[in-house]
Every structure is written in C-alpha cells, then in structure tokens.
Image (cartoon, helix red, strand yellow):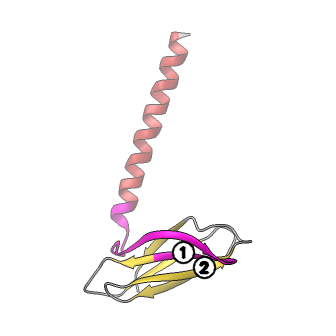
Amino acid sequence: MRKIIAIALATVACSASLTLATTSEAAAAGGAPQCVKVRKYFNKGHRRYVRLSNLCTQRTSCFTIVVPHQRDPHGSLPKGATKNVRYGTTGAPRALFVKNISC
C-alpha cells in the first residue's frame, strides 16, 4: 500500500513539474507584449462585454477574446486606453480569456 502511494505521489510531482516547465516556456516564447489586461467581465441587457485596458502607454495593442465554440472576436486598443468590448450575447458561452497578439 505504501509503495502504491509513493508511486502515485512521485507521478503527480513529475507531471506538475513538467506542466510548470511547459507553461514558462510558452510564456517566454510569446511574441506579443502583454499590454492588454482584463478589468472585468459583465453583462448589459442581453449582451456580454469585457472591459479591457491597454497598460502600454507607448503603443497600440491588439487582442483576441477567446470564446468556446465561436469565432474569436479581435481588435485593438490605443495607447493607455480603457474600453468596453462587446463579444456576444448571454445565450452564448462566456469568454475564457483575452490573448495578446501582435498588430
């Protein structure tokens, strides 16, 4: 019984370290600067919105809103701006995250 638990714990530890390694490599490999930040997700009437801010004060930043089972809306924010972006209706799924892309 102790051997089985030790093997299971070792497997979990190895998989966690591999996940952290691949995540840090993926973050380092991203070409676009991380300027667009999500401030808040909200609904207004029957529409879904996300409030985005551009943290880069020197350049325009582009983004893609990732929504499951839908075409991903994309756009850009001027330098230092905050904007409410409509991305769907309340009948559609909520956005998973906002991805920074190069313009």
Q: Position of residue 85 (x, y in %)?
A: 53, 82
Q: Residue furthest front?
A: 45
Residue named by callout 2: 87
Residue named by callout 1: 65
Residue density around tag 2, few if under 14, some if 14–19, many if 20 or more, within 10 Å = many
What amino acid does circle 2 point to?
A: Tyr
Residue 32 sits in which quadrant? bottom left
Q: Is residue 80 magenta?
A: no
Q: Residue furthest right?
A: 91
Q: Are marks 2 and 1 in contact (CB under 8 Å)?
A: yes
| 2 over 14 or under it: above or below | above
Q: Quadrant of the N terminus?
A: top right
Residue 30 sits in which quadrant? bottom left
Q: Which residues are magenta?
A: 27-51
Q: Position of residue 12 (x, y in %)?
A: 48, 32
Q: Residue at x 70, y 77 (%)?
A: 46
Q: Secondary structure at mark 2?
A: strand
* Mark 2 vs mark 1, CA separation in Å: 8 Å
Residue density around tag 1, few if under 14, some if 14–19, many if 20 or more, within 10 Å = many
Q: Residue at x 36, y 65 (%)?
A: 29
Q: Secondary structure at mark 1?
A: strand
Specify which label sits upstream in the sequence, 2 or 1: 1
* Nearest to the observer: residue 47 or residue 45: 45
What amino acid does circle 1 point to?
A: Ile
